[in-house]
Image (cartoon, rainbow, N blue to C red):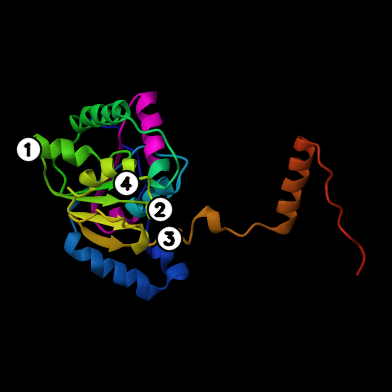
Amino acid sequence: MLPTVPVSPIRLDDYVEAAGEEAVQRLREAARPLEGARILNLNSTAFGGGVSELLLTQLGMLQDLRIDATWQLIQGPEEFFAVTKAAHNGLQGADVRWTTEMMATYMDTIEDNALQLDESYDFYFVHDPQPCGLLAVLEERGRKRGKWLWRCHIDTSAPKQHVWDFFAPLINRYDAAIFTMQDYAHAGVNGPKLAFITPTIDPVTMTLVSVPIIVLYGIGIVLARLFGRKTPRTSNTA
């Protein structure tokens, strides 16, 4: 079994002030046909990125909407994550090394993770290139269950062709693919249904909390002392 990330439920009523009653009600109505559905989200890390922040909020909300949403992580050796980092950068247009050995490392680790996958879910959301190959392994073994969606959170408008040529056939196995912008759906995605959804920030997250100026000034003093810089002086002149 793949490791599961614990997610606390989020009360949608807490968003009425920030988003408005109408928006909250629309969300409840849209989710009603999916009540009781089981959804598994798959990615490679629970910390340190925008995907993690999005999932913490979205899955917490889904629980309040009576949708059984779970978040699990793929695992692998350091060599695997070195390969996925190169893939991540190459899909965004960086010049990266991409070899037959790297592709084999990727698929070998993906196969190990696929063997641990719970096949009892109705929907599978696979995030970014790291776990992208899971569906290919399952289909080749005749083990695909439910609907599969690939969610791309990066800019793939101008990928390095040799990296894209590896991932495009994997993406095309999905029932649907979600990109941030239409320009990011690079040529060659011709199997899945396409959707374009811009990322959002949780309106009640600590990221958006106002910080008093005196606190910011205090942080500046601490940083100045740590890095040996002069602390800016406040002016008493009108």
- Closest to the observer, 92 or 238: 92
Residue 108 relative to residue 12: left or right: left
Tell which tag, 2 or 1, sits nearer the viewer: 2
Q: Residue at x 40, y 42 (%)?
A: 90
**Amino acid type indicated by mark 2:** Asp
Question: Of all residues shown, which one is farthest toward the bottom?
Answer: 22
**Badge 1, how many Cα within 10 Å: few under 14, some, many 20+?**
few
**Badge 3, how many Cα within 10 Å: few under 14, some, many 20+?**
few
Q: CA distance from mark 2 to mark 3?
A: 16 Å
Residue of label 3: 200
Numbered circle sitting on residue 142: 1
- Closest to the observer, 28 or 153: 153
Report the quarter where the C terminus lies: bottom right
Residue 219 relative to residue 231: left or right: left
Query: Dot 2: what SS?
Result: loop
Q: Residue at x 24, y 60 (%)?
A: 194
**Amino acid type indicated by mark 3:** Thr
Residue of label 2: 155
The verdict on residue 63 being magenta is yes
Residue of label 4: 127
**Amino acid type indicated by mark 4:** His
Q: Is residue 5 above or below residue 32?
A: above
Q: CA distance from mark 2 to mark 4?
A: 13 Å
Q: Quadrant of residue 58?
A: bottom left
State if disc 4 and disc 2 touch (CB < 8 Å).
Answer: no
Magenta residues, as a range?
61-88
Q: Is residue 77 visible?
A: yes
